[in-house]
Amino acid sequence: GDPGTPEAARSMWARRAGDGVGAVVRARDNDRAHAGIPERRVDMWEALHATFCREAKEAGTQGRPRCRTLFLGDSITEACRGTQFGEYYDELAARRRAFEDFFPLKEARAFGISGDRTQNLLYRVCNGELSFRHPPSVVVLCIGTNNLGRDNDSAEDTFLGIRAVVLEILQRLPGTRVLLTGILPRGPAAGSPLQMPPTPFESDAYVGQDSPLNPKPNPKEGFKRKYSQPGLHTPAIVAVNDRLKALASGSGGSVGYVECGYAFLTTDGGAIRPELMRDVLHPSAEGMRAWFAVLKPAVDALRNAPAPRDSWYEGPRALGDAASLGGDGATVANSGRDPGAHNGSLESVSPGVRLALSRLIAWSPHALCVADATAKDQPIVFANDNFYAQTGYPPEEVLGRNCRFLQGPGTDRETVRAMREAIARGKEFHGRLMNYHKNGTSLVNSLVMSPLRDEKGVVTHFIGIQRLAPAKSLDDAPAEYQFRAAL
């Protein structure tokens, strides 16, 4: 089931990792753990994990400095320590100096392990790496590129893995805010074959460069295939980052998102700048400085923002009153958009259910909308940011309209008829139907519609929980993934 809130997430992970080792639930078809289920690694990974657990426990004790900013992630984050798998390299020392110039070690730590996926980081945070006596004020989270680039996980699975880590952090570190950097741009260029990514200090690992497999490369073609954007993984990166923005926007200020990808690209966005990311995966020392120049103001803004609510969808925002909200925290969280106005209003919903509804809308990973059952044609009066991100429609094309605009030629009429009958009777509806993204992509919608009642028990609204997945991705996926996506 969906964790829904940090509190619910805690109990779920406790059941799955309560033995201290962590039971790995594996997909039958590919024998690999889902991106949102804790999974350990072995060898040097265990030693690094133990080191991070010790550093967390010692921070702020016996005269040691507190950790006020914690970076969590993979090899990109580990390079902030000047290491790869715990080994120091001269070429990585400059990246550590860049980190220390922006985030001095007296107040910052970087816990990263090369090659980690979301499930590996989730195991780490469930098993000791957040054991701070004094919780950091901000955790900077950069994870997920290995899910896409090494495991070829879907954008949906990768997002759910990142979200699971966020919920765990919020539960284990009360008062801490999480800053999401999104997944950074990476190579190879679109059209290249799938291939293993380079290590943090290689510069010629991708196809098109001088290597035993290609002893006489064409320099222009090699440069294009290495640095050109959009890259092979760009569509998935954009999809994940859009979902992360939506998560941050609805978090009540507990989670922020900062757009970092542009810092590594040319002005026209057509290529990764070689001097900033020469292996098109790991920022160079100069790339680190460009990245931190974007991150540092966002970290400071989130740290100094007003105390978080349970959800931005509560209070004035739930009533559609954008004028009473603002501040740097909101700007970081929703990427500068007007906080509240674009979501609509829950003012017409019974106050008795409004708070619970706002929390559900905020923390659900799905596209949610609320329709007024008492108004003509039952228009949408409220939608969460995931609705906009997953359907591609902007607020002005959603609010005030009936949900049928998502239907199309492949939508089963019998399913639609059954849905309308359930609405007319004020009953809950469960069904699967074909919907369409604004760009025309067909989406399989595992839909749940539930009635919302007022104090007298009269149905006044319906909430639609729309679990959307591109139809093609399900057709191409193994049976186990199709089952997970449907859930």
Image (spheres, rainbow, N blue to C red):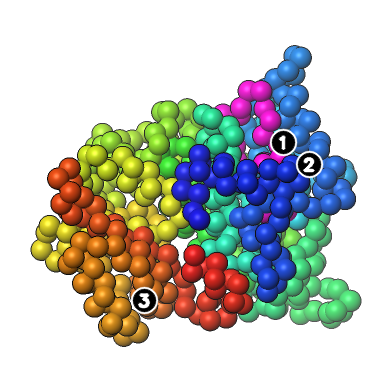
The residue that appears at 14% across and 45% down in the rendered structure is 456
Q: CA distance from mark 2 to mark 3?
A: 45 Å
Image quadrant of residue 484?
bottom right
Image quadrant of residue 222?
bottom right
Q: Is residue 120 covered in magenta?
A: yes
- Residue density around tag 3, few if under 14, some if 14–19, many if 20 or more, within 10 Å: some
The residue that appears at 35% across and 84% down in the rendered structure is 410
Q: Is residue 191 covered in magenta?
A: no
Q: Where does the magenta region start and end?
A: 116-140
Q: Nearer the viewer, residue 292 or 36?
A: 36
> Seen in the image, is 88 located left or right of residue 430?
right
Q: Position of residue 444 (x, y in %)?
A: 42, 74
N-term-proximal mark, 2 vs 3: 2
Look at discs 1 and 2 and give the one toward the viewer. Answer: 1
Q: Position of residue 1 (x, y in %)?
A: 50, 56
- Per the image, label 1 sits on a secondary structure element best described as loop
N-term-proximal mark, 1 vs 2: 2
Q: Is residue 420 above or below residue 384?
A: below
- Per the image, label 2 sits on a secondary structure element best described as helix
- Tell me if label 1 and label 2 are in contact, CB under 8 Å: yes
- Tell me if label 2 and label 3 are in contact, CB under 8 Å: no
Residue assigned mark 1? 128
Residue assigned mark 2? 49
Residue assigned mark 3? 433
Q: Is residue 79 above or below residue 459?
A: above
> Seen in the image, is 371 located left or right of residue 48?
left
Q: Position of residue 463 (x, y in %)?
A: 29, 57
